[in-house]
Amino acid sequence: MKSTKKWRIAGINFDHDHMGDNLRMAFNHPGAEIVGVCHEDPLKMQRAIANFSIPPDRVFTDYRLCLERTKPDIVLLCPATARHAEWVLKVSQFGMHVLLEKPFAASLSDADLMISAMRGSGRLFAINWPLAWYPPHVTAKRLVDEGAIGEVTEVHFYDGNRGPLFHTADKVELTEEEREREKPFTWFYRKEAGGGSLLDYLGYGVTLGTWYHGGRAPIEVTTVVDEPTHLEVDEHSITVARYSCGLSRFETRWGTQSDPWTHQPQPKCGFVIVGKQGSISSYDFEKTIRLQTPQDPVGREVPADALQPPRQNPVQYMIHCLENGEPVQGPLSPEICRIGQRIVDSAVASALHKHTVRLL
């Protein structure tokens, strides 16, 4: 039954610029209120403070004070990948529901620590993948579930952008001077912090890929990365996963010639899903998807569904789950995300040892 309460939301750790996007979702939700923001470096919060008119008494540099004084219902977390487990464990001790920004974790062991901690807290735990809210990809899943292409046998994924320093929250583009100034300090290019295109984007493909595959996990994984000499992380990776039903391919790229939210690069960013009775192409930000079947080999354009509440964004969805006593499902659920993390860990191991590995 729907509640009339105002859901108190705090944003903690601004390492990932998606925090600004997620806070905007909370700001725009009629049943939510931003009660606090926290980061050890106050400068990282300035854009959000200004955008959402957050008063000084709701701004913190100590997460404990933030949680103790503001008492949020839901915590939005956006730390660097390598610190996801650390921050989820910290917040879980305070008994709040957690919405963690992608990717899930730096390792399967970290993922399991988070799942265990949140299960012990008795609170909802969701992992947000922005691609899960793109109308074409949601429409593709609806058609898969309706049997439009039969049993899924292959998922092909290519995605990325010009690079993590070309834009910040709300897709605000940074100047070349700003990018160069930021590069020595950003975690995206540090291996120990979980940087690199593989850890940034592969989770998208394999988590939504697991969703499209109906929760099926692969048998083995083969991955190669580009190993740029001037960086300690990759900017390009290709993963092939062997399932009992066939092969699926997942490719990540920092360095596309354009960003998909402005102009689709080539290859186009998104998914091609192949089934026993047809195929679907679903590309980021496009207004239609393409459905091809043996009965219609020419194929046809299908308009992307207009997403409706409560499935328009992760904050809206999480509040819906809380108000209706529903578990988190789909690509935000820890169960689906854990399968994706197994594939990511296997890909990392394969790239490191330069051979195919059994799924971890």
Image (cartoon, rainbow, N blue to C red):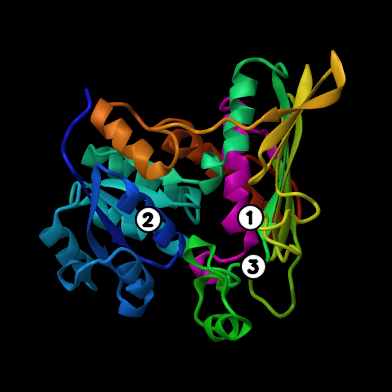
Where residue 163 is drawn, which disc sits there? 3
In the displayed structure, 112 sits above or below 18; it is above
Q: Residue at x 26, y 33 (%)?
A: 322
Across and down, in percent, residue 353 comes to: 71, 57
Residue 31 picture quarter: top left
Tell me the element at label 2.
helix
Q: Which residue is mark 2?
A: 24
Q: What type is the residue that disc 3 sits on?
A: Gly
- Left or right of 341, for residue 99: left
Q: CA distance from mark 1 to mark 2?
A: 18 Å
Q: Are marks 1 and 2 in contact (CB under 8 Å)?
A: no
Tell me the element at label 1.
loop
Across and down, in percent, residue 246 comes to: 77, 28
Across and down, in percent, residue 243 comes to: 71, 30
Task: Tell which circle, 2 or 3, labels the residue nearer the N-terminal end.
Answer: 2
Q: Nearer the viewer, mark 1 or mark 3?
A: 1
Q: Which residue is mark 1?
A: 261
Quadrant containing the N terminus in the rendered view: top left
Q: Are marks 1 and 3 in contact (CB under 8 Å)?
A: no
Q: Is residue 198 magenta?
A: yes
Give the magenta range: 191-220
- Left or right of 227, for residue 131: left
